[in-house]
Amino acid sequence: MAGTDVAPADALTDLFGLLAYAELMAFFNLSGDAERASSLADKAALGEMAVTEFGHFRGLHDELTRRGAVPEQAMEPFVAALDAFHARTAPADWLESLVKAYVGDGLAADFYRAVAERLEPEARALVLEALADTGHADFVISRVGAAIKADPTRAGRLALWARRLVGEALAQAHRVVADRPSLARLVVGGADQGGPAGGQGEIGRMFARLTDAHDRRLAALGL
Amino acid sequence: MAGTDVAPADALTDLFGLLAYAELMAFFNLSGDAERASSLADKAALGEMAVTEFGHFRGLHDELTRRGAVPEQAMEPFVAALDAFHARTAPADWLESLVKAYVGDGLAADFYRAVAERLEPEARALVLEALADTGHADFVISRVGAAIKADPTRAGRLALWARRLVGEALAQAHRVVADRPSLARLVVGGADQGGPAGGQGEIGRMFARLTDAHDRRLAALGL
């Protein structure tokens, strides 16, 4: 049961399909945030970020086609989990929406960066490109910071919200890796401490590291 | 009271501001349609069109900046009318939403094409670029055609919906030209039959021509 050096094709199709659908959702969510923004300047800035996410989606979509996969089929296995995550974490207002995008972007970026290390150079470049900073984090930090300054009682509510988001994200992530063993092996590959490659324990340790990084990001938000 | 050969700067700022906000709204509406589409392929196709509209918005936004205007200030006078139009014509379902985008795109394209003839070459190119076909019309004709074939009773409801859209669009357009005399003069400039340049009668005749073109487009939709 040795780890593979080269990711198998079906696992890569899974990875790109998952990332593509996540980017498409990010596009929809950011467009919605842009529409709900109160100033025209914020609408334009968030719209610009949404369009960047769509560009990432397009890159993954085209790469799936290039590899001989049908992009819609590659995304399909992840639709239920990602839709469930979004349905269970519908933001009550614009601030919750910004925090959700920030938390989601951050967790996704850490996850894909960890996975990218294990890919061939070409696939790695594509994944890292999809994580390229859209300027969104700075935007959220500035807007949420200003909102908390204006009304410090918001900090507690938003911190609880961020905890709930991580809980739901982990719940769905565990569902996905349980359903897709080859993706699970790709994700934790020939990784670290003990346990069978792709075992639930190893996955759990990886998610714990992602959660640590998340806590550091929340501190940057003032939560 | 002769027509001017060169459009005055404030009228152009108005025109670009109006067009920019309309494109931003088109981006939001198409993103929403993409999100509500039932298949992943339709989500991707409509998302692509939304991104094209955002590109047009960006071009107009940058041109306003280049001309020394503040884009947000240039859009501001048109926010109330366009928001009112969208609030009064909230689609009840995906089909109504597609028909609305088709009717709106068509009317807007005819309007801007008529105005573009009266602009200097550079401004004209920008306006015509913003009207470049996004492939949206063909998409709507195919989807609405299939939906009516599947259930012919839909045709009557959608035809009524299209009439309402035009009524609301004309109502808001009359409000805008009443508020912005220099824009009204630009729109009907040294145009056709009698009446003072930019007079309400002339505007009315221009809108009537747009409505004729709209009726021909509805026939293409099978309505």
Image (cartoon, coloured by chain):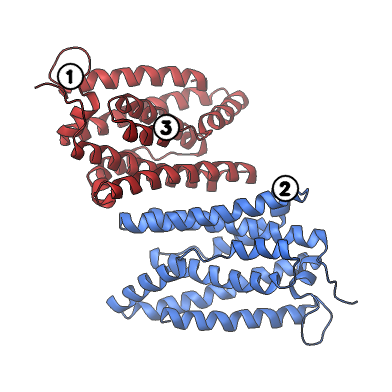
Chain colours: A red, B blue
C-alpha span from label 3 to label 1: 24 Å
Mark 1 on the same chain as mark 2 = no
Name the residue at the bottom extreme: B193
The x and y percentages for residue A160 are: 41, 25
**Residue behind mark 3:** A105
Going by the numbered disc 2, the residue's amino acid type is Thr
Q: Can residue B76 be spotted in the picture? A: no
Residue at image point 82% right, 77% down: B197
Q: Quadrant of the N terminus of chain B?
A: bottom right
Image-based side of B2 in relation to B50, left or right: right
Q: Identify the residue position indicated by label 2 in the image.
A: B65
Q: Chain of mark 2?
A: B
Residue A171: percent from the left, percent from the top? 25, 30
Return the chain for callout 3: A
Q: Amino acid at mark 3?
A: Asp
Asked if residue B153 lies left or right of residue A137, the reply is left
Instruction: Identify the residue under disc 1.
Output: A201
Q: Position of residue A9 (x, y in %)?
A: 20, 39
Of mark 3 and mark 1, the one earlier in the sequence is: 3
The amino acid pointed to by label 1 is Gly
For the view shown, which residue lies furthest in the left direction?
Answer: A1
